[in-house]
Image (cartoon, rainbow, N blue to C red):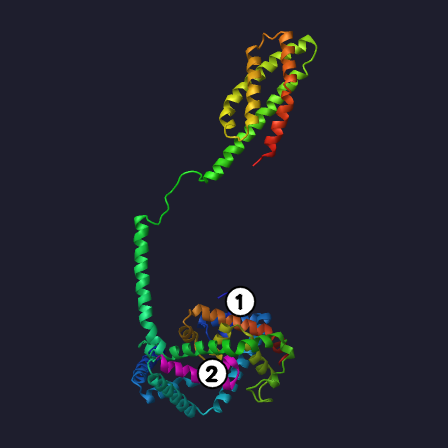
Amino acid sequence: MTDEKMEEREATDAAIREAALLIRGLRQGDRESFLGIIRLYQKKVFQMAYGFFGNREDALDVVQETFLRVHEKADLFSEGRNLQNWVLQVAKNICIDYYRKNYRKRKELESKKCLDELDPAAEPGLPPGEASDLRRILGLCINKLARRQRLIFVMRHYQELRNEEIAQALNISLGTVKSLHFKAVQNLRSMLAPYLEAQP
Amino acid sequence: MKMNHGNRKRFVDYLSGELDPGEAEAVMAHLKDCPTCQAEEARLKKLLDAASAQKRDVDRVMDTVDWEKLALRIADAAESRAAAVRVRPATRPGFFGWLLRPALAYLLVGLFIGGLAMFGAFKAGLLTPASRDGYVASRDFLDKAELELARRETVNYLERSQYLLLDFAQAPPDKEGAVWQKEFSSQRAADLVSSKRFINAHLDKIPMAKAREICDQIEALFLELSQMSGRLDEAQWQEIQSRVEQSQLLLKIQLVKKELQNREI
């Protein structure tokens, strides 16, 4: 086993031990343990939710709802599991529920519009003039991807998770993660074809 | 390693740093010689760079969030939610709840006992209707059917007799034809006599004395005719013809037949 892999293994074991301590504390009603869990993973959950919805306020709502559910369902977490994966799985479910409740109609309206008709500068979340056109249009196109493709693209590029971590968090095979990521890239590539050709 | 430039999946893995060193070398070697793939790689690189740039935008948005405050707010919300669950009193049945409980208990006991009783009754075969073989019909229906059968048989008998008597009445004058007719008529008369024996039982059921009488007259005549079969000379033949004419048998048959036909059930 190489040194790099040994280090990685040790880091994982340490994370599992820490997670077990935090969860035990949470189950006993220890506020500090719960705050520790929130501090550890709130940014990861935010990245996922922001990538999913492209909206700061919705992402913050998802972060809050995710940790409320973690607090409520702490007894269901089996020790020895990766706490980050469990929290991300809860976050994914919250994202899907939130999307079903609030975004389906909006998405239907948006899909009726052609991509060219959308004004990227008018999109919320990004200050005008700071990001390039391609970046802004990419944000719109990510929202047009199928739900699982979008989730994997966001986890891979915004949360910078490895394929193995995504597979564990979403409880799917590594092959499925690779295939969905490839499909997401292909779809984005064809949606953005004119921009990719035109940009220097 | 040989590389097919149609396999773009490898470009994505290559650009994401997901390939083994050997595979990455093969992709690089292919890219050196293939301008089409170079262009494709450039496009995908641009796309992934844009995604990385977007990640930086997300980081910038994240800098605007007060994470510590958010963590405290979430912890407060979780604690107040948990406290609300603990404080919520156990639901107690209201006035109607207390009132209905015994009624519901009696109802359940009743249903249980009723169910057991039904089960026992079914097991004992008390509720199973006795099985009957064949077709079942009411007495009234059977009487009507029998009467209708008798009526039809009688009408049929009268009709056949009518045709035979008409043949008698219109017997041809030539000798050869008359002989054939006589033979043939005698046979038909014998058939009708045996039919009459069959319908005698039915005739009792028809409430019509006229039908019975006329059928008896016809039977007597046909009996005579069948007994004389083959030995009927010209004089006897004419005598029978005149007897049929005098008794107006054909007319009577017609009238009775009509009356029977009108009584169809």
Q: Give the residue type that dot 2 points to.
A: Gln
Q: Using the image, name the chain to which the residue with label 2 belongs.
A: A
Secondary structure under the numbered disc 1 in the rendered image: loop
Q: Amino acid at mark 1?
A: Asn
Where B158 falls versus A76 (above or below)? above
Q: Quadrant of residue A69?
A: bottom left
Which segment did they paint magenta? A50-73
Residue A119: % across, % down: 63, 83
* Residue at image coords 32%, 48%: B125
Q: Which residue is mark 1?
A: B7
Going by the image, does A191 lie left or right of B175? Answer: left
Image x and y of residue B159, in percent:
61, 25
> What percent of the width, then of the height, locates residue B117?
30, 56
Residue denoted by label 2: A47
| Quarter the C terminus of chain B occupies | top right
Question: What label sits on residue B167 in the rendered view?
Answer: none
Was residue B27 drawn as part of the magenta stretch in this picture? no
In the image, residue A56 above or below residue B118: below
Q: Is residue B105 above or below residue B209?
A: below
Query: Is residue A118 rendered to the left or right of residue A69?
Result: right
Residue that appears at 58% across and 8% down: B230
Q: From where the camera sits, is residue B197 visible?
A: yes
Q: Is residue A68 magenta?
A: yes
Q: Residues within 10 Å of mark 2 (few under 14, many from 20)?
A: many
Q: Disc 2 and disc 1: Cα gap in Å?
A: 31 Å
